[in-house]
Image: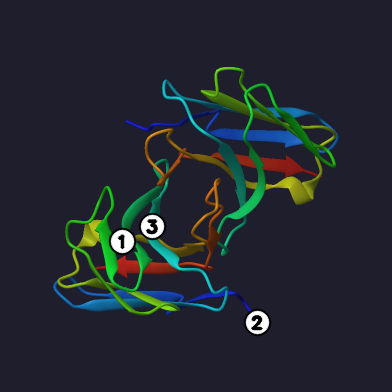
Amino acid sequence: TQLLEQSPQFLSIQEGENLTVYCNSSSVFSSLQWYRQEPGEGPVLLVTVVTGGEVKKLKRLTFQFGDARKDSSLHITAAQPGDTGLYLCAGPRSNDYKLSFGAGTTVTVRA
Amino acid sequence: DADVTQTPRNRITKTGKRIMLECSQTKGHDRMYWYRQDPGLGLRLIYYSFDVKDINKGEISDGYSVSRQAQAKFSLSLESAIPNQTALYFCATSASGSYTDTQYFGPGTRLTVL
């Protein structure tokens, strides 16, 4: 059983559309990270959210950390083909400094 | 040059063979990790090391061993490879004292065990 559940598993949209990826857990996290992984490469950190209710923006990407620090979302506005990739959420549990990763959401943006 | 490098990038081997995957980093980080990635399962931690004399098992360490030869080098061994160890393997590093433990990943090694 994954500690962090991501949904959906796959997402295919047309260029210009919006999308949201969810990351949920029954456990509390001291912080949550979002990584993007492209084929043939390792994951690369996009953002870290630390405070419950926090919202961070990275150009067309908006990240939100739930008030209870058990969930997070990633919203992409006007998706572009360059947004294609595997999006992973990860976080250390409050009593455990090792990172737990979600299974990932594969996003495909069609031109 | 990449900060975290892995060799080899691809490897095909046969059941029962001994395999070593190597990781080197120039980031100066003291923490290093080995993960495997399987479709639909995400990244799972095999072993981790917080300094040269510290080695810890992760959630799926059976069938694997590691060696931390220096602060910059962390190798993963499969003593007797089996087909269900076919996967993408990633090395990662992070700095101690980091509250959020941001990890920096290598490009991965694709291992196929026939």
Q: Amino acid at mark 1?
A: Thr
Q: Could you tell me residue B114's position as x and y percent?
A: 24, 68
Would you say the residues marked 1 and 3 are in contact, meaning their CB atoms lie under 8 Å apart?
Answer: no
* Residue at the disc numbered 3: B35
Residue located at (56% from left, 64% from top):
A40
**Above/below status of A98 relative to B66:** above
Residue plotted at (54% across, 74% down)? B28
- The crowding category of the residue bearing disc 1, from other C-alpha atoms within 10 Å (few below 14, some 14 to 19, many at least 20), is some
According to the picture, the residue beneath numbered tag 1 turns out to be B86
Examine the rendered structure and indicate whether residue A47 appears above or below residue B28.
above
Q: Residue at x 32, y 30 (%)?
A: A1
Label 1 vs 3, first from the N-terminus: 3
Looking at the picture, tell me which residue is in the foreground, B11 or A51: A51
Residue wearing tag 2: B1
- Element assignment for label 2: loop
- Above or below, B48 relative to A100: below
Give me the chain letter of mark 2.
B
Q: Earlier in the sequence, mark 2 or mark 1?
A: 2
Colour mapping: rainbow
Q: Quadrant of residue A74?
A: top right
Q: Nearer the viewer, residue A41 or A51?
A: A51
- In the current view of this chain or complex, which residue is farthest to the front? B97
- Label 3 amino acid? Tyr
Q: Are marks 2 and 1 in contact (CB under 8 Å)?
A: no
| Direction from residue A77 to residue A6 in the image, left or right | left
- Amino acid type, mark 2: Asp
Secondary structure category for the residue under label 1: loop
Percent position (x, y) of residue B43? 42, 49
Question: Residue A72 location in percent, x, y?
Answer: 60, 27
Measure the C-alpha gap from mark 1 to mark 3.
13 Å
Quick one: quadrant of the C terminus of chain A? top right
